[in-house]
Amino acid sequence: SILISSDLHTEKVYNTTKGTKISFNLNTAFINPSRPKERNNDKSLPLSLQNDPFSGSSLTKTPLRKKEFSEEEKLKLIKYYDDYHSKFESEIKKIKEKLGYVIIFDGHSMNSIALENTPDQGKERVDFNVGTLDDSSADKRLIDIFMGALKQEAPNYTIQKNFPYKGGFITKKYGNPKENVHVIQIETKRSLFMHEGLNNGPNSFEMKDSLKEITSIFSKVFEITEKKYSL
């Protein structure tokens, strides 16, 4: 079975021929690279910043597996987590040395109807959510360029910034505009590019033909953003 909250097909949504593309190809029910390595018990934080990579439940408190991993299994899986973040850090260093700055687009997908334990629970979502940690994860000029490009290339789509998602672990960990490392998180509504499986229909989790249009939009937006910011 597949969890309806799984980030499926996002490597195709944000598929661009330019820049460096880093994908995590394990289902996040096994290990989630968008979680801190150590659990944080600060209840004031969103669940995404409290749970560790092996959290046994989703943000909706749905159990992810029948039994917890053994310590031996965790040691094997954590290598994928470490490799993913090692690749991030290596590419950040390489690109910054070359260009003097780094732009990271952290691409995800979200359900069209908000699930439990989310800020907008039960409500219909916008098409694109842009997370910038209240404009602290990237240079404000870069954020404005990106938002302008997205509105230009997606005039018939709805867009919202910092709600319901402000940005998660990747945005918080790597976003450091003072050091010229900029992170913008993007959440695309799944129903735009796939049959998301909310009603267990016959085509659940399959891609739609409209995926091509969404991919084209982001390819253009990324190119416009980088080009204008570099001027």
Image (cartoon, grey):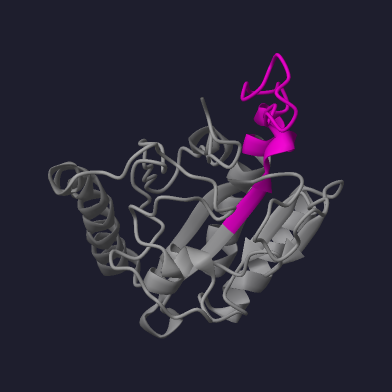
Q: Please, which residue is most extreme toward the top here?
A: 202
* Residue shown at 21% from the left, 54% from the top: 82
Image mark count: 0
Any magenta on residue 191? yes
User: Horizontal and vertical percent for residue 74?
Assistant: 20, 47
Q: Look at the image and tell me in which quarter the C terminus lies.
A: bottom right
Relative to 18, does residue 52 appear above or below in the rendering? below
Relative placement, left or right, of 122 versus 91 is: right
Any magenta on residue 49? no
Q: Work out whether residue 108 or residue 54 is closer to the camera in this orientation and state it.
A: 54
Q: On the image, which quarter does residue 99 sit in?
A: bottom left
* Residue shown at 54% from the left, 71% from the top: 46
Magenta residues? 186-215
Relative to 39, does residue 149 appear above or below in the rendering? above
User: Horizontal and vertical percent for residue 102?
Assistant: 39, 66
Q: Is residue 231 visible?
A: no
Relative placement, left or right, of 209 versus 7 is: right
User: Horizontal and vertical percent for residue 139?
Assistant: 54, 78
Q: Is residue 212 visible?
A: yes
- Judged by its main secondary structure, the magenta piece is loop
User: Horizontal and vertical percent for residue 78?
Assistant: 21, 50
Q: Please, which residue is most extreme toward the bottom here?
A: 178
Q: Work out whether residue 149 or residue 86 is closer to the camera in this orientation and state it.
A: 86
* Residue shown at 73% from the left, 52% from the top: 114
